[in-house]
Image (cartoon, grey):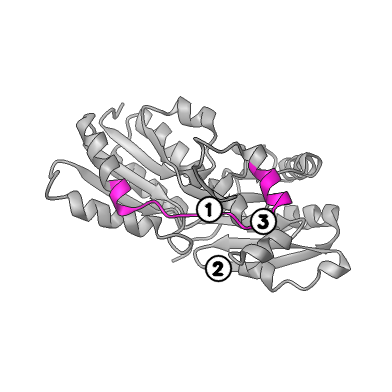
Amino acid sequence: MNKDVRIITDSGCDISAQAESEWKDYLVVMPFAVTYNGETKLDRQEINIEDFYKVLKENEEIPKHSQITQLQFEDKYRELYEDGVRSIIVDVIDSHGSQTYAQAVIAADNIKDELPELKVYVVDGRNYSLGYGYAVVEGCKKLAEGQSVESVVKYLEDWASHVEAYLIGFDLRHMKKSGRISAAASFLGELMGLKPIITLYDEVTEVVKKARGEKAAIDAAVEYVTARMTPKTPYSIITTTRPELDKEFIDKLTKKIGYPPAMVEKMGVVVSCNAGPNTLAVFIRGEERK
C-alpha cells in the first residue's frame, strides 16, 4: 500500500460520495465554486444535485462555475505534505474547458523549492465527468494494490489519451443557452424531432449522429458507441432526470457489448451547468489521440 500518496481531482469528476468515502485514504476531491440565484456555493458540500436539476429547469439564468485556483492547490499541497504525503497525482477536468489544470501546474512549480521532498505529477484529464473520474478511481485501486506512483501516472495519461465521451441531447435548450457545447448551438434539427449524439473531448464538440425521436437516438447511440469502443474495455455512464431512458440505454448497451458499465453515476453540478438536466452520456476507450 502507498500511504504517502494521494490523488487529487476536482468535483467535475462525478465520482459518487460513496466511492469518495471508500477511497478516502488515497483520494482528495477539491470542490468547484458555483454561482446561481445570487449565491456562491461549493459543489458536493453545499449543493444537492436533485435540487440543482430543478434550478436548471426552472431558471433562465445559467449557473457559473469557477476554476480551482493556484492558491487553493498550493494550500492543499502543503496540507497533504503536513499529513505525511510525499507524492501527489493531480488529475483534473479537460484543460480546454477550464484553467484548473494550468492552475495545478503553476502551484506545483511554486512549491517545489519550499517542499523539495514533495513530488507533484499533474495530468490533464482531457475529458469531463467520468471521462476522468473513472480513471481516478482505478488509480486509487492501483495504489492500494501497491503499484508505483509512476505506473499510476502512466495509466492516467494513457486513459486520457484514449477516452471518448458521447452525449445524447434529449433537450438542447440549456446546452444552447450555456454556449459551452458548440455542437449543440449549431444543431438545427430540433423542429423535426431530431436528437443529436454529441462527442466531447479536448476542444472538440461535434454532432456525430442524429436520430428522429428519443428511442431512435438511444438505438443510434448504442450502435455508434459500440463501433467506436475498444473491445473488452470498461465504459461508464452518467444520467440526469430521465430514468426510463437511462434504463433503456443501459440495458441495450449492456446487451450489445456483453457486460455492464463499470460505473453509473448522476451527472454532477459542473457538467450539468453546461449540458443541462435532460441528457445522458457514455464514456468509452477509443483510439489514441495525440
Q: Closer to the N terminus: mark 2 or mark 3?
A: 3
Q: Residue 110 carries which label?
A: none
Q: Is residue 186 above or below residue 172?
A: below
Mark-to-mark CA distance, 1 and 3: 11 Å
Crowd tier of the residue under label 3, counting other residues whose Cα lies within 10 Å: few below 14, some 14–19, many 20 or above:
many
Q: Does the magenta stretch include residue 7?
A: no
The residue tagged with tag 1: helix, strand or loop?
loop
The residue tagged with tag 3: helix, strand or loop?
strand
Judging by the rendered image, the residue that carries numbered circle 1 is 128
Q: Which amino acid does label 1 sit on?
A: Tyr
Residue sitting at x 67%, y 47%:
55
Q: In this view, does 144 lie above or below 168?
A: above
Judging by the rendered image, the residue that carries numbered circle 3 is 167
Q: What residue type is labelled 3?
A: Leu
Q: Is residue 137 above or below residue 168?
A: above
Crowd tier of the residue under label 2, counting other residues whose Cα lies within 10 Å: few below 14, some 14–19, many 20 or above:
few
